[in-house]
Amino acid sequence: MMEQVFSVTYNLLYFTIVLVTMVLVILDNRSPVKTMAWILVLFFVPVVGLFFYFFFGRSTRKERLISRSGYTRLVKRPMQEYQNQVCLPDTDESGRLRLFFHRVNGALTFGGNRVSVYTDGVSMVEALLRDIRKARHHIHLEFYIFENDAVGRLVRDALVDKVREGVKVRLLYDDVGCWQVDRLFFDQLLCEGIEVQAFLKVRFPRFTSKVNYRNHRKIVVIDGRVGYTGGMNIAERYLRGFSWGNWRDTHVRIEGKAVYGLQTAFLTDWYAMDRTLYTSSEYFPKMEEEKGTAMVQVVTSDAVGRWRDIQQGLVMAVANAKRYFYVQTPYFLPTEEVMAAFQTAALAGVDVRVMLPKRADAFVTHKGSLSYLDELMEAGVKVYLYRPGFLHSKLWVWDDEAASVGSTNLDFRSFEHNFEVNAFLYDVPLALRLKEAFLEDQSYCLSLSARLWARRSWTNKVTESVVRLLAPLL
């Protein structure tokens, strides 16, 4: 009898918790697609569903990493430089996009930058090591992954040498991205005098709800004058690739006042973890001489802001494209807004091209990505599958006028959960350079057609469709 009472009580309590959780998901007023995905998980696999919702499902968009007054202090010097520069053109095609990012993101556009493009890990790491050797005051690094392998140790040794010369070095790595890295590796960096912080450490019970909100940014700032951002982390595979193919990525080196944007992003994240705010002129040095001709705007997005800044900017850029819009992304799990933007542009006669890897490093997300290709091609979007290896590049280029290189994938995770950073480049020569890189990669791709794609096996079709149901949660 007691066993029956206990069993009934347990079941009632359990299903009450599940029901209350469903109600909370509904009241959160997220997109209907995401809400339904969570309800399906909670209904059909309640035990697993509760676990995943506790760790991955709760929203933090009402929180702030830094106070308004703290952020105002941080951007005071960049804002002065922004206001003192010669007026930038605001009547060109990119003017509305720049204004949008300025209003919702606080992103400042600076002219007179020199931008170098790297499409392979070897050239990027070589350039990075050269700049590290030249550092005189500080080196700031922020990566999702910083591996304890040959490349990680090479960069580590270069940083240690600079610390011994009196240069201040700070490293911010993502706790989940570096889960497989022995903590002794980072402890050794601390012992050498490098300031090291893990982003949102996942420790039970305090930060378990933050495991879903990861810092996916790749930022390097050296002396406040030179910066790097793009898709590459510090790990050997970014140089050597896999046994089954190369690693294709895109990264940029920026020299000029646009580095202020990268510095602001780093110092904001550092403050969020260390509670120390650095605002002195040493971190935002005056740069009287123009380094180049490129206009650059560094834009961030995160899981705690009110708006999905980069996603909304992407939709706006696609909608304003007149002739073409080319995209490279390793994962394609788009929100409804992004999918509709691509389809609408293609139906309006814009040459929209999406390039994905033929083979990816993550089976589930890759299968989910493939489920969207039918709808793209039906609207006239051209789809290409990169064959030589893994395409990890996050590149957008349009109309020979503008481009974006950064850390943002075209998926729910990057748009809604991750902390991301992209450099928007408003410069014709740069846009042409990146367009050329896209077209060169295209020559190694399998060009899909709706007819060819329809021939894939039913097993693949079913797998793709099932995974797609969970796309908002991946």
Image (tube, helix red, strand yellow):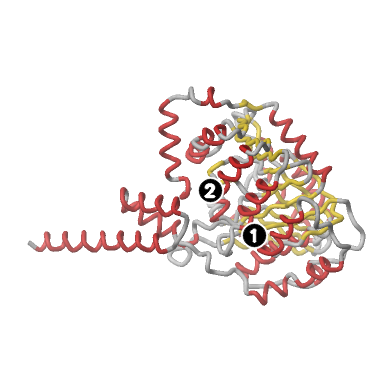
Q: Crowding at label 2, few (<14), some or many (≥20) Cα neighbours within 10 Å?
A: many
Residue 116 found in image quarter = top right
The single residue placed furthest to the right in the displayed view is 289
Question: Percent from the top left, x then y, of residue 82?
Answer: 81, 65
Residue 150 found in image quarter = top right
Total marks shown come to 2
Q: Earlier in the sequence, mark 2 or mark 1?
A: 1
Whether residue 334 can be seen here = yes
Residue located at (55% from left, 47% from top): 411
Question: Percent from the top left, x then y, of residue 214?
Answer: 56, 56
Q: Secondary structure at mark 2?
A: loop
Q: Secondary structure at mark 1?
A: strand
The residue beneath circle 2 is 335
Residue located at (72% from left, 42% from top): 322
Towards the viewer: 182 or 198: 198
Whether residue 193 can be seen here = no
Task: Quarter of the image for the N terminus: give it.
Answer: bottom left
Q: Is residue 128 above or below residue 441?
A: below
Residue located at (81% from left, 53% from top): 295
Question: Percent from the top left, x then y, of residue 182?
Answer: 56, 52
The residue beneath circle 1 is 172
Q: Crowding at label 1, few (<14), some or many (≥20) Cα neighbours within 10 Å?
A: many
Disc 2 residue type?
Thr
Q: Is residue 253 above or below residue 21?
A: above
The single residue placed furthest to the front in the displayed view is 348
Q: Is residue 284 above or below residue 252?
A: below
The single residue placed furthest to the bottom in the displayed view is 69
Q: Is residue 372 above or below residue 51?
A: above
Disc 1 residue type?
Leu
